[in-house]
Amino acid sequence: MLRWIITLAIVVVLAGVWVWMFLVARRRQKAFDQQYEAARERREVFVLNKRIVKERGQTRLTKYTKFKNYQVVGRITVSQSIRGVQMNKAQNVTFRTTKTEYDKIQPNRRYKVDVAGNYIGYVVAPIGKPKTKDSGSSSVQTGTKKRSWFSRRPSAAAAQKEQKGKGKSAKDKA
């Protein structure tokens, strides 16, 4: 009987701690969302690099554990008007983001994103498609796929031999 009382007490305490953590996390998420909405801007970012970094937290118990951070290094143009003079400056910034937004972003492409400080909240849309040149021709193609080394196409000479052999009838062969 004593075991059941101790087990029940432990379960009640763990449930209480879980509910308390849930309420604290929800309150912090609401505060973050209000802050993000107040400072959100839509910007055009040219993504230079992206990486996953494990960093320690900055306060209390979080400074003893490492968390995965998704970082995107991008180039933005900062505009400022001073006494009627318009000044533009390109600046490299390291942004943090979530895993879903991190997966949407590819390096060496331009994106429209919602930014608040150094946090990318939402990737709105990529701007344009990268252009690649075909070797041997002067035309420009977009959206070409790279093929892996083991899925080779037959060479052009072999393809021509196959086509020549298929078109002949019995009269042509004799």
Image (spheres, grey):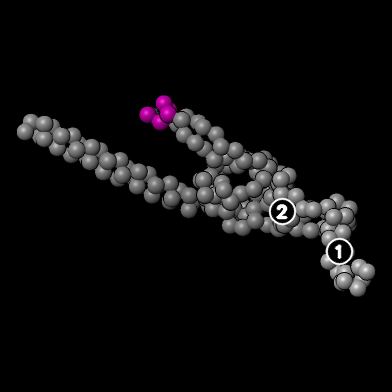
Query: Magenta residues?
Result: 61-65
Residue 12 horizontal side relative to residue 98, left or right: left
Classify mark 1: residues with Cα within 10 Å, few (<14), some (14-19) or many (20+).
few
Majority secondary structure of magenta residues: helix
Q: In this view, does 108 lie above or below 11?
A: below
Where's residue 105, x and y in %?
A: 61, 49
Q: In this view, does 69 lie above or below 39?
A: above
Q: Which of marks 2 and 1 is nearer the N terminus?
A: 2
How far apart, in angstroms, are the residues tagged by discs 2 and 1? 31 Å
Whether 69 is among the magenta residues is: no
Q: Which amino acid does label 2 sit on?
A: Lys
Q: In which quadrant of the rendered image does the C terminus lie?
A: bottom right
Q: Residue at x 65, y 56 (%)?
A: 126
Q: Is residue 84 above or below residue 67?
A: below
Q: Is residue 78 visible?
A: no
Quarter-of-image position of residue 49: top right
Q: Who is closer to the viewer here, 59 or 142?
A: 142
Mark 2 or 1, closer to the camera: 1
Where's residue 50, x and y in %?
A: 62, 41
Q: What residue type is labelled 1?
A: Gly
Q: In which quadrant of the rendered image does the N terminus lie?
A: top left
Where's residue 124, x and y in %?
A: 58, 57
Task: Name the residue carrying label 2.
Answer: 145
Task: Name the residue carrying label 1.
Answer: 165
